[in-house]
Image (cartoon, rainbow, N blue to C red):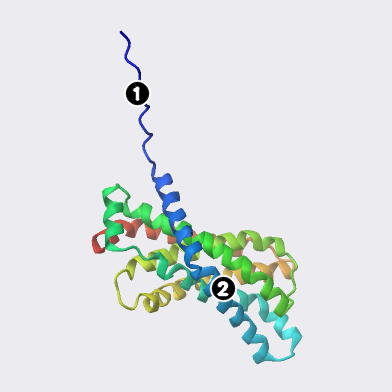
Amino acid sequence: MTVAAGPAPDARVTPLTQCLLLAGKDLRLERRTGEALLVTAPFGAVALLLVPLSVGVDTPLLRQLGPAMYWLVVLLFGVLVTLRTSAVDSAAQLAMLRLAGVSARVRLAGRALGNGLLLLGFELLLAPVAVLLYNPDLTGWAWQVPVFVLVAAGLAVLGALADALAAGLAGRTTLGPLLVAPVAVPLLLGATGVLTAARYGRPPWPWLVLVLTVDLVAALLAAWCARYLEELT
């Protein structure tokens, strides 16, 4: 007598799978609410428009200021993307994730991954606006491709970490930018330095190394702080 074999047991869900699922959850919430790309992005475009209005018709000055103003707007408004209301997990959701065996590091990584994808979309939406308004010198524009990714990644990790630190506080949306903006200054310097170096024929890779270093330090800091943040939430 032979016994029919039952269905094979499900493979153990890996931390990477959990991270991807959490990032997907954040992206689905953003698709429903549109906080980042339908609300914050238009405000960022308006901020880019205000500078030409204040400077006037000084075209050479606008072309020179364009890249720096673009990255400044990405930095300031990008923090709001990482601290959007739809990214807040309720106490019941956190309890469910803990019961499912999702660690604090995985939750933080999932939030950072979701933030990074939204920030990358935010950057790509604002880039044509900056080009139309400022008409900057785009010599060496290909170097901006890795800059977009690295800046989005670094700002996403810093925003996720600040969000975890300010979780449950009444002034979360106020305290978060105050925590992120000063630390993210090297990202701003590196992003603007890459295009400036390429424009003058100098190698931009030292600025890329600066941005990459900030990303790595932010990731290591987030991984180290995650277990201590678990005790606060």
Mark in the foreground, 2 or 1 = 1
Quadrant position of residue 67: bottom right
Q: Residue at x 60, y 81 (%)?
A: 46
Is residue 164 shown left or right of residue 141? left
Quadrant position of residue 146: bottom right
Q: Secondary structure at mark 2?
A: helix
Q: Amino acid at mark 1?
A: Gly
Q: Amino acid at mark 2?
A: Ala
Q: Secondary structure at mark 1?
A: loop
| Spatial CA span between label 2 and label 1 | 52 Å
**Residue sitting at the far left:** 231
Q: Position of residue 158 (x, y in %)?
A: 44, 65
Q: Position of residue 153 (x, y in %)?
A: 51, 60
Is residue 100 shown left or right of residue 142? left
Give the labeled residue for mark 2. Answer: 41
The circle drawn on residue 6 is: 1
Q: Residue at x 53, y 59 (%)?
A: 117
Q: Position of residue 15 (x, y in %)?
A: 39, 45
